[in-house]
């Protein structure tokens, strides 16, 4: 029977105990209440199933006894709550190793298929031997491989089938085995079987099969996890099916799955290849907001995207993001950023970035050095490029033939003949970077630009003896060099031999033959060059004969010119027109040259030829040949004479820009143009800046009045 004890206890609340801090006051009590104490009565009810002890049974304690310690007070509690018999751990718990160099995943919501608990399979040895037999087997028909599958040593249950499936190397065998296991219908096909098969198909770039399997999973109700979507998206990217990659990525997002690092980086690369910069930045910011920490691959994608667009601000944004997230760039990222700096035309920042890479303790590879050399070459930083080359040899940095060829091309662009010869000799002595056809082409370009026809022919013969194939660029450089040296017979020999060796003439080679034809002084040499051109482009030869004929009407020239230009590559159209004008001037067909210049301007081959402001007018002939520039000057003077005849306003200054040429051996247009101005007695004088000729309004009008007497009569 339970005993109920009820009593009333007087409780006195004192807000200011003696041992309390008097400086601390409650903010929720009035000051008057702080000085008062209250007495309240509380009823406490206690019930117990045990009989209450009598006074005789209760131990007698005296108030004078010293209070027990805390351990003694807790001893009865431990005796009642803790068991005497404790469960002993029979075995050491399985430890989990954590790689200290790899940070913990920041994205915690990845949905992947759970791995089954490991269990020892005594049949694993036989199954691996069977998988090895399947990998080594060669079959031409599907039925032959299926007959081998029937020899499986153990029943293809879930574990056995998964082991064999994961051991197959060729995607064809993996796909056939997957379908064979599925046709047996011995167990439900789980997501992991599809994932293993899809990864094998991804190596074979079989996206259509992967997509069929994914749609089959959706139809059969098999769950697509993060690995499934990642495999589909990355395979679509490898197959350049960017729209498919985006389609499956959006489908993944709709299901609520969180992409992993590989998927994010792949989709960022897809968007960047499609030129969708805004989508890339939006996805990047959204991914970071969900907890994703970009790795070096993702930043490499961003840097490449901004680099291809030449967006320096975007490149700087990538560098700032990497620093804020404490992501240290690796060599691949530095290579991408260096290439981006080159496209953005920032050679100084590229050099600073390279020095930062060295300070970080990273060793540049061939791609790093190639990118930096290209940047220096485009910026005409010959001194820095050569210093880099010396540093490469001193520190034994890796150099391949691509890097050597890049250095040679840089020397060819700048005109560093001696340095190029040293590089070329180093390649000959190298065991791994022997000169190839691009190396010989660069040297032919250097000798051709310097007018070293004899050295160029010796190098060509050496190239043939070494068995190095001739390419169209090398043939073009050598033809141009021999044409300038008036060695037409050697030119014909080189051209015919190159055609026999399989070289297919392109528009650039045809333009080179046209320029040589314009330089020919004798009709015999011109006919030899014309015969070579006829083998390369017969329609072009027909048009040349058409424009030099005095009986050809302008409308006929216009229609045929349109056909020739439309059949020519865009980058070769203006050189074609320049050479045709030169040929007409060489044949004393000056009016035809003016007609061709008009047609070239009409079809947009000479944008920016004339520039006008309120204070000055200018003629920019930097993209014209010598004959075309002289024709443009004469046409400009005719136009100015007409303006004077109409008594229209003229600016105070007139400029003619010829440029100076960035090549060491380039003479540019300045000398020829200055000689032509001298022959015309034109009032243009050399400006303080090289390649610019200037004339005042008064001098030019006076000269035009003397050249065109009718102007005086009209005023």
Image (cartoon, rainbow, N blue to C red):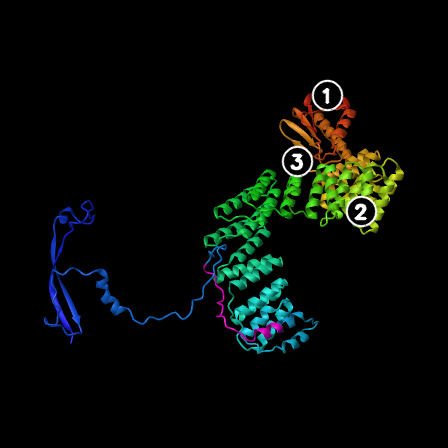
Distance between mark 3 and mark 1 Cα atoms: 48 Å
Mark 2 lies on a secondary structure that is helix
Specify which label sits upstream in the sequence, 3 or 2.
3
Q: Are marks 2 and 1 in contact (CB under 8 Å)?
A: no
Q: Is residue 667 left or right of residue 312?
A: right
- Residue under label 1: 702
> Which residue reaches farthest right?
524
Q: Residue at x 60, y 52 (%)?
A: 273
Location of the C terminus (image quadrant): top right
- Is most of the magenta stretch helix, strand or loop? loop
Q: Residue 390: x and y, percent?
A: 66, 40
Residue depicted at x 17% and y 49%? 19
- Residue 663 vs 462, above or below: the answer is above
Name the one closer to the observer, 16 or 573.
16
Quadrant where the N terminus lies? bottom left
Which of the two labelled residues, at mark 2 and mark 1, occupies the earlier sequence position? 2
In the rendered image, which residue does mark 2 sit on? Answer: 463
User: Which residue is at the far left?
Assistant: 55
Query: In the displayed structure, would residue 114 be above or below residue 598?
Result: below
Residue 542: x and y, percent? 83, 45
* 602 or 296, nearer to the observer: 296
Q: Are marks 3 and 1 in contact (CB under 8 Å)?
A: no
- Judged from the image, the secondary structure of the residue bearing numbered disc 3 is helix
Range shown magenta: 108-129
Residue 293 shows which numbered tag? none
Asked whether residue 264 is in view, the answer is yes
Q: How many marks?
A: 3
Q: Which residue is mark 3?
A: 383
Query: Does 663 lie within the magenta span?
Result: no
Between disc 3 and disc 1, the foreground one is: 3
């Amino acid at each position: 029977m339970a005993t109920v004890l009820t009593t009333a206890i007087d409780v006195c609340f004192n807000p200011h105990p003696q041992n309390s801090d008097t400086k601390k006051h409650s903010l929720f009590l009035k000051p008057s209440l702080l000085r008062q104490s209250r007495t309240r009565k509380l009823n406490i009810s206690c019930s117990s199933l045990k009989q209450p002890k009598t006074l005789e049974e209760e131990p007698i304690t005296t108030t004078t006894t010293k209070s027990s310690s805390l351990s003694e007070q807790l001893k009865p509690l431990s005796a009642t709550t803790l068991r005497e018999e404790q469960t002993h751990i029979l075995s050491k718990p399985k430890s989990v190793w954590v790689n200290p160099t790899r940070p913990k995943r920041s994205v915690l919501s990845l949905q992947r298929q759970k791995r089954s608990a490991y269990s020892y399979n005594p049949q694993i040895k036989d199954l691996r031997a069977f998988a090895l037999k399947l990998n080594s087997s060669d079959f031409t028909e599907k039925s032959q491989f299926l007959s081998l599958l029937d020899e499986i040593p153990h029943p293809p249950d879930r574990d056995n089938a998964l082991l064999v499936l994961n051991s197959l190397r060729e995607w064809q065998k993996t796909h056939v085995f997957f379908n064979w296991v599925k046709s047996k219908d011995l167990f439900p096909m789980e997501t992991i079987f599809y994932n293993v098969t899809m990864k094998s198909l991804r190596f074979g770039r079989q996206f259509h099969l992967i997509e069929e399997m994914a749609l089959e999973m959706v139809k059969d109700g098999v769950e697509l996890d993060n690995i499934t979507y990642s495999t589909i998206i990355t395979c679509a990217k490898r197959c350049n099916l960017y729209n498919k990659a985006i389609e499956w990525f959006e489908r993944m997002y709709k299901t609520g799955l969180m992409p992993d690092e590989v998927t994010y980086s792949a989709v960022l690369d897809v968007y960047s290849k499609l030129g969708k910069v805004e989508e890339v930045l939006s996805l990047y910011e959204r991914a970071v907001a969900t907890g994703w920490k970009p790795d070096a691959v993702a930043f490499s994608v961003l840097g490449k995207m901004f680099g291809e667009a030449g967006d320096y601000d975007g490149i700087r944004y990538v560098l700032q993001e990497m620093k804020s997230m404490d992501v240290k760039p690796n060599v691949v990222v530095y290579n991408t950023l260096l290439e981006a700096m080159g496209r953005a035309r920032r050679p100084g920042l590229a050099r600073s970035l390279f020095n930062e890479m060295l300070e970080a303790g990273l060793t540049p590879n061939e791609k790093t050095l190639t990118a930096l050399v290209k940047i220096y070459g485009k910026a005409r930083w010959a001194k820095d490029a050569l210093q880099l080359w010396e540093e490469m040899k001193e520190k034994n940095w890796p150099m391949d033939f691509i890097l050597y060829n890049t250095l040679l091309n840089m020397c060819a662009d700048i005109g560093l003949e001696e340095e190029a010869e040293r590089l070329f000799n180093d390649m000959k002595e190298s065991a791994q970077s022997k000169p190839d056809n691009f190396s010989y082409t660069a040297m032919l370009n250097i000798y051709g630009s310097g007018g070293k026809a004899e050295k160029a022919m010796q190098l060509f013969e050496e190239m043939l003896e070494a068995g190095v194939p001739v390419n169209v660029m090398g043939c073009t450089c050598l033809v141009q060099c021999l044409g300038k040296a008036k060695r037409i017979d050697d030119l014909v020999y080189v051209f015919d031999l190159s055609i026999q060796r399989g070289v297919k003439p392109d528009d650039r080679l045809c333009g080179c033959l046209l320029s040589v034809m314009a330089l020919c002084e004798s009709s015999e040499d011109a006919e030899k060059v014309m015969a070579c051109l006829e083998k390369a482009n017969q329609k072009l030869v027909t048009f040349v004969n058409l424009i030099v004929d005095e009986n050809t009407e302008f409308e006929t020239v216009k229609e045929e010119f349109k056909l020739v230009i439309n059949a020519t590559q865009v980058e070769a159209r203006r050189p074609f027109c320049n050479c045709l004008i030169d040929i007409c001037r060489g044949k004393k067909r000056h009016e035809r040259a003016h007609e061709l210049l008009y047609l070239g301007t009409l079809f947009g081959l000479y944008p920016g030829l004339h520039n006008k402001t309120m204070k000055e007018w200018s003629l920019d002939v930097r993209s014209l040949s010598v004959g075309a520039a002289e024709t443009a000057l004469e046409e400009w003077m005719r136009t100015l004479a007409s303006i004077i005849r109409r008594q229209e306003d003229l600016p105070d200054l007139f400029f003619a820009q010829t440029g100076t040429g960035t090549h060491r051996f380039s003479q540019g247009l300045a000398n020829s143009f200055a000689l032509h101005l001298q022959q015309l007695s034109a009032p243009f004088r050399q400006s303080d800046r090289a390649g610019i000729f200037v004339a005042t309004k008064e001098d030019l009008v006076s000269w035009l009045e003397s050249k065109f007497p009718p102007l005086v009569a009209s005023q």
